[in-house]
Amino acid sequence: MSTPPEQPNPNPYQQPAPGQNPVPISQQPTQIGGYGTPVPAQHNPYAQGGPYGQPGAGQPGMGQPGQPPAPGYYAQPGMPGMPGTPGTSGGAGRAVLWAVVGAVVASALWGGGVLLLGKSSSDKPDLRGYTVKDNLCETADLSAFKSTYPKDDDDPTKYAAKTPTLDEMYCDEGLEKDDSTYSDAYLYVQVDLHKKTDPSGEFADSWRGYTQHDSDYKVTPVKGYGDEAYLVTDDTSTSPYVTLAVRDGWMTYTMQWSAFGSSSSDSDIPSADEAKQWVLQATKATLPKLK
């Protein structure tokens, strides 16, 4: 004879009344968290958020915040079994076992997450011997540009800044030809020494993404400059543009040349291919001077 189904309990977390058998573990509501047992959410100081402030995905195997655990899943130490309920100690034992297994799994996932998501902020920065220079305009070797732009900028923009997490150096100069009374092109150099965060994870994509900014940009990997380097060029007729970005350990370097002109002076503007050689040569000469 079939047994009529039990009426659903409106409160799945209600404690069983005295004298009643608790709901078997197989019939208890399954909590998200893996292995049918809710594991308390582990605080992970290394959890990585998504880019640009978007929250990252939760770690697998961890309980969802705000969801109350079902009573009886975590055995209370020192609590005797309820009278008249045979088998309670076995259910509590299984709950303890599953709780321990879940905690171990959560710890393993957390530890693996640290290895997969990136290095701890306690890691020593890999600066490869690069140091802050007070005047980057004087330190940078820009002799590769002198054959075309022999005049010096009398008042370049420069600064250096040191903070606990990041050291910065910057130089911005106007480039002039012999017969010019104003700048024919502009050059800037920036060097960042990252002391708390390894920039390697995002460096390549930050430059490859230029092709999505504008279809005129071309991005080319370049070998022989640090750990990785990318050359970004735009060879439009009136405003050619060249940028070389280099990462060497936790140091990032950028040199950018750009020129602007009117249609009547287009023939006097160097091409991006010409400027590319100047930027490559100047960077090759400048990087050793930053150590």
Image (tube, grey):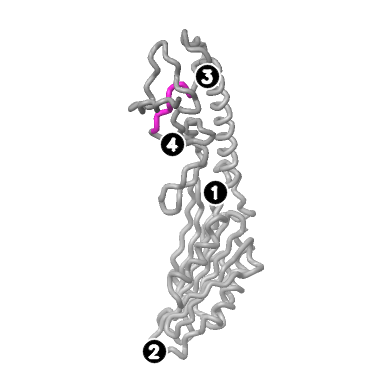
Rendered position, 144 above or below 267: above
Element carrying mark 3: helix
Q: Which residues are magenta?
A: 67-73
- Closer to viewer: mark 1 or mark 4: 4
Q: Residue at label 3?
A: 92
> Which circle's residue, 4 or 3, is located before the other in the chain?
4
Element carrying mark 2: helix
Q: Amino acid at mark 2?
A: Ser
Task: Give residue 195's mark.
Answer: 1
Residue 253 pos. (x, y %): 55, 62
Q: Residue at label 4?
A: 64
| Total numbered circles | 4
* Residues at marks 2 and 1, CA–CA distance in whole angstroms: 46 Å
> Which circle's residue, 3 or 2, is located before the other in the chain?
3
Q: Residue at label 2?
A: 263
Image point (50%, 28%), residue name: 26
